[in-house]
Amino acid sequence: MEKQKIVVKVSMNSDKKTQKALQIAVGVSGVESASFVGSDKDQIEVTGEGIDSVELTTLLRKKVGYAELVSVGPVEGKKDEPKDSKPPEATIQFDPYPYYYRSYGVPYYYVYPY
């Protein structure tokens, strides 16, 4: 899996709700970091691997109030890729079951020589 970035808009009127929303966001499995973004700091940006965005939004709706899923996407930035990456070499695989066994199955009759 690759890292993903999820942005959820949450209506937060008090400091208590902002703390609770941040605790809920960090408590979801797979979350590495969470922060407030947006002009009014009313959006939570969550980054991590394997985060269930629907679960996160549902928990925020239940515990805090109004929550709207704004965007889900990969994290922009540098990618950890080696500079001397070689293309994968072609490998030959042995097929233990030839074509006639896979397509026709077991024959129904046999021919015996005299």
Image: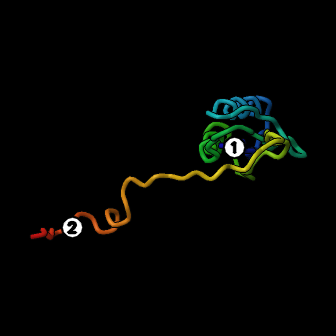
Q: Position of residue 46 (x, y in %)?
A: 74, 39
Does any portion of residue 9 appear in the rendered image? no
Mark 1: secondary structure: loop
* Mark 2 Cα-neighbour bin, 10 Å: few <14, some 14–19, many ≥20: few
* Position of the C terminus by quadrant: bottom left
**Element on which disc 2 rests:** loop
Residue 33: x and y, percent?
76, 32
The residue positioned 80% from the left and 39% from the top of the image is: 82
Q: Which residue is drawn at the image coordinates 38% and 65% (left, top)?
A: 99
Viewer-proximal residue among 11 and 111: 111
Coordinates of residue 110 in the picture (x, y in percent)? 15, 68
* Left or right of 106, for residue 15: right
Kind of residue indicated by mark 2? Pro
- The residue under label 1 is which amino acid type? Glu
Q: Which residue is mark 2?
A: 107
Up/down of 27 relative to 80, above or below: above
Taking the image as shown, residue 95 lies to the left or right of residue 108, namely right
Quadrant location of residue 25? top right
Separation of disc 2 and disc 1 at Cα? 48 Å
Q: Which residue is mark 1?
A: 2
